[in-house]
Amino acid sequence: MADRHDADRNAPFFAQPSAEGAPVARAVPPAARKGPLQGLLRGVFSTDLRKTPLRLKLVACLFVGLYGVIAGRLVYFGLHQEQASVARRGDDVVAAARPDILDRNGEVLATDIRVMSVFAEPRRIIDKDEAVELLTAVLPDVDAADLRKRLGTRKGFIWVKRAVTPKQQQEVYRLGLPGVGFLPENKRVYPNGPIAAHVLGFANLDGVGVSGLEKYIDGQGLSELSGAGFRLTPDALAPITTSLDRRATYAVRDELAKGVAKFKAKAGAAIVLDVNTGEVVALASLPDYDPNTPADALDPQHINRITVGVYEMGSTFKAISLAMALDAGKVNLNSRVDARDSLRYGRFTIHDFHAQHRVLSVPEVFTYSSNIGAARLALMVGVEGHKAFLRKLGQMSRLRTELPESAEPLLPKNWGELNTMTIAFGQGMNVAPLQAMMAVGALVNGGLLVTPTFLKRDEAAAKKSAPRVVKPETSEELRYVMRLNAEVGSAKIANVNGYFIGGKTGTADKIVHGRYAQDRVFTTFMAIMPADKPKYLVLTLLDEPQALPETHGYRTAAWNSGAVAGKIIERVGPLLGLPPRFELPTQPFPLLAKLGYGYANVPQTGGREH
């Protein structure tokens, strides 16, 4: 009894009831005291044959569970890799985000919207004929033959249709075709339709700028970022603020469209330029197109006639010729020019349309639009001096702006005296209208050549790098003769009350089959407002306007382009913060008064001789 007691004295005791109900202490063997997990493992790995079925069941369960997890992971990775592969292929072709384009007041001109596009994976299409039939039934504008051909390739990804409507998306989804899915992408939209289309240009379905400012934006690094794999979102891109005023652009286009229709012209264009900042505030060129349907832009008749077309600018070039002679000191406002007879040069003869057959003052050369007078002024300066002046004004080389579309001027191959004589009155040299505007803008803004821009810019930044091309006195002299022309000359039709405008007409016979056609003209009109302190320069042009009974059978610029310019000034002036002034300025040309030309500050209408 003592030995047993010693052996079990370290064992715990549990109370168990006795037969009489009193608890009796009993020792638990050490083997029975191990935990349930240890006991389970002991049972599994025991060599006792009686426990073999239990071991087999447990091992089988473990292997089934392990292989189930592995199979599930394989399925998961397979599905996600397929989705990732589609996503990677889609990233290469979906349209990237582009920055918003705004007008100068923050109004949206171009923006992105999120759309869904339908794609297909030809290798996963089971029945290609069925897929083509079903897809073209809900997407009727998809070409069935082309889709069948593309689905027959081994490509991993093709587009079925880009930018589908929500209704079309639901219909394609309900088809339940394996290998057909959707990808979200960006679509470029132009909420104002054709307004400013030639300035904005357009981006294609892949989000690549094709023309206009859209192409310019890509050239500033956007396309490189997209090509490098950067995920661009509209929120991460700063908007582009243009120089355009949306309201003014709409008004200019509207009045131009009315003028083109009224005078039955083949085409027309109009532009408003800030002569102090070089900003293009409004531009329209007709016929135009809606950038939301960019295929229309491919029509050669839909070019931007302000920057891409090059034309003989007619008598508007006389402003350049007059300023050249004045700035060179060859003449002054009191000088006289002989216009009594036609001017002969070899077998060529230069005539005046409104011949006076007398000696003209320098202002009269301008107001009577004398070809003879302009030619004589240019000859005073000489061929080389003439070329140097035109080069200084940027007329001898291509004008570069933010718009990629531009054209080289057409210059004489062998420039001699006859060329200088004809170019003086706007024939024999073709330039882009915006190029001619840049020159005239410099001649009226005080003498600084400011390069035009389609982006918002202040005056200080514009003039920081603007070279001086004429003296301030020359600039004021030109403003005076332009104002005089609006009072008593060919620009009277555009002399809108309250805007103190100055202007110059230009009519050029068109060249047809290498010869000047007598029945086809290209008319232009330039106007500054106001002439005492110019802010804006307005240009209108019409291609082959027709004579009307109300124009007394004339088709010259004063009757058509001038009339359209007057309508534009009247409508656009208030929109641009220039309300009409009904009291004329008391001394609009102070520098001329100091030089002794006091009459320049006296209104000419109804008083002084023409």
Image (tube, grey):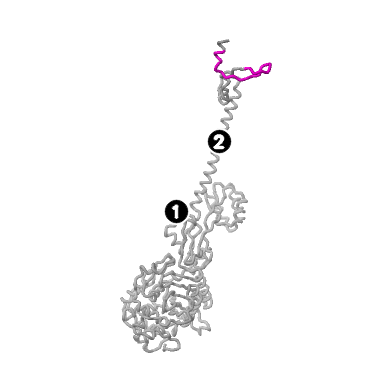
Using the rendered view, name the quadrant where residue 481 is placed: bottom left
Report which residue position mark 1 lands on.
227
Q: Position of residue 187 (x, y in %)?
A: 52, 58
Does the magenta portion include 22?
yes
Q: Is residue 326 above or below residue 49?
A: below
Going 53% across and 58% down the picture, which residue do you hit?
Answer: 113
Does the magenta portion include 165?
no
Q: Position of residue 295 (x, y in %)?
A: 51, 63
- Amino acid carrying mark 1 in the image: Gly
Going 47% across and 54% down the picture, which residue do you hit?
Answer: 232
Q: Is residue 478 above or below residue 161?
A: below
Q: 475 or 412, which is in the foreground?
A: 475
Which tag is nearer the camera, tag 2 or tag 1? Answer: 2
Tell me which label, 2 or 1, sits earlier in the chain. 2
Q: Position of residue 263 (x, y in %)?
A: 52, 78
Q: Is label 2 in a helix, a strand or a loop?
A: helix
Q: Is residue 393 visible?
A: yes
Circle 2 packing at 10 Å, graded few (<14), some (14-19), many (20+), is few
Q: Is label 1 in a helix, a strand or a loop?
A: helix
Q: 574 or 177, which is in the foreground?
A: 574
Q: Position of residue 339 (x, y in %)?
A: 37, 87
Left or right relative to 231: residue 594: left
Using the rendered view, name the quadrant where residue 64 is placed: top right
Magenta range: 5-24
Report which residue position mark 2 lands on.
69
- Amino acid carrying mark 2 in the image: Val
Q: Is residue 406 visible?
A: no
Q: Quadrant of the N terminus?
A: top right
Look at the numbered discs 2 and 1 and tell me whether their residues touch, using CB distance below 8 Å.
no
Q: 287 or 562, which is in the foreground?
A: 562
